[in-house]
Image: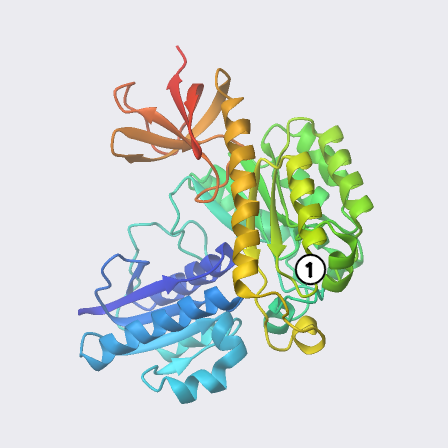
Amino acid sequence: MKQNTIDIITLGCSKNLVDSERLMKMLESKGYRCTHDAIRPVGEIAVINTCGFIGDAKEESINTILEFAKRKVDGRLRELYVMGCLSERYREELTNEIPEVDRFYGKFDFKQLAEDLPIVGETKQNERVSRDGSRVVTTPSHYAYIKIAEGCDRHCAYCAIPLITGKHRSRSQDDILSEVEELARHGVKEFQIIEQELTYYGVDLDGRRQIAELIDRMADINGVEWIRLHYAYPNQFPMDLLDVIRSRDNVCNYLDIALQHISDPVLDRMQRHVSKKETLALIDEIRKRVPDIHLRTTLMVGFPGETNEDFEELMDFVKSTRFEMMGAFAYSEEEGTYSALHYKDDIPSEVKQERLDRLMALQQKISTELLSKMVGQTMKVIIDRKEGDYYVGRTEYSSPEVDPEVLIPINERRLKIGHFYNVQMTDSSEFDLYGILTK
């Protein structure tokens, strides 16, 4: 165990990552050295930032807590703390069931953890330099996640997030832009804009959807080369955002918009407040206004009452719409949600898995075909890392860690991590593109 070293483990989404980065800044200001997601934890203290969204995520969080609890019992850890969504929702139960944890914190009181730990020395700086006054950036130094709001006012039948995070709360535009300016001054070039429902941003401030205005102002900041938008919602989509995406060169032609399903009976039971007709019209309008846009979506199979006909309608939708990227998951009943209280989880698990496998196989075929059509094109690529015999980068159409990457042979020439290059695509596989530098 390394004295005054804290291992921080972040589970779940990038919104949790931002919380961990803020906590790290607070802890380093008290003299601690922090490691993040270390392959081999070495600290005498560990903090686990948990996810509580669906069953698999909760299971991963519980297993991680138990793993570190055993480290403490074995004498390889002095103190163990847990924070985040899981402990926000189940703090009392977890406290009773896992006594090895010194204290549980929730989604919003994790700052108290930094206050509860004693000062151990002068401020220490992690090798990942603090990029602004409030957080330590744990991602590669050329990109960062910007959380513009917390919470959600939607009450989709299956979703526990509003139960965990509460109502939607937007940060002010000036606060967000100040953070982006400071990050850009320290070399961050790419900004992943995240919140639970990005297209609702600002409504709680003055009744207006302000996302288009915010992104337009952000695009003016010196040093901001790419802005990418995550987690839009189809109902009452702010069309002026599309004009900003089309007109601003540094706003990526990329939109992550979770649709969940296309069958009207399923959408109604899900309480999505959008119809199939409205969804199709929105996708058509998005692609009409931004012809080069790449869409990522998330879909769900096995929601209570989903018939074979509903699922085949979803398959036909994916086949005809041809999303560039798509994720999917099987319905997981979450206690306290509308669907858990009012619907029977009537789709057998083996049927859910079979539907999920079929849907993802279809999407993989589509994604592979779309990637192959990019061969021969020359694109702007940012280099993320060096791995094996390749430099690994991304185009504007790919978000870190979840989307296709571009592999460039190391023998091309020496490339700098975090820099942009023009790359001609020479080949593609199921998941990646291959390219060479243009002369």
Residue 151 lies, in percent from the top left, at 63, 65
- The answer to whether any part of residue 225 appears in the image is no
Q: Nearer the viewer, residue 223 or 144?
A: 144
Q: Nearer the viewer, residue 427 or 13?
A: 427
- Rendered position, 370 above or below 67: above
Residue 203 lies, in percent from the top left, at 76, 57
Q: Which residue is mark 1?
A: 306
Residue at position x 30%, y 29% in the image: 390
Residue at position x 39%, y 82% in the image: 103
- Amino acid type assigned to the residue bearing label 1 in the image: Glu
Q: Is residue 89 left or right of residue 313?
A: left
Residue at position x 47%, y 65% in the image: 56
Q: Secondary structure at mark 1?
A: loop
Q: Is residue 327 left or right of residue 47?
A: right
- Rendered position, 176 above or below 86: above
Q: Nearer the viewer, residue 102 or 3?
A: 102
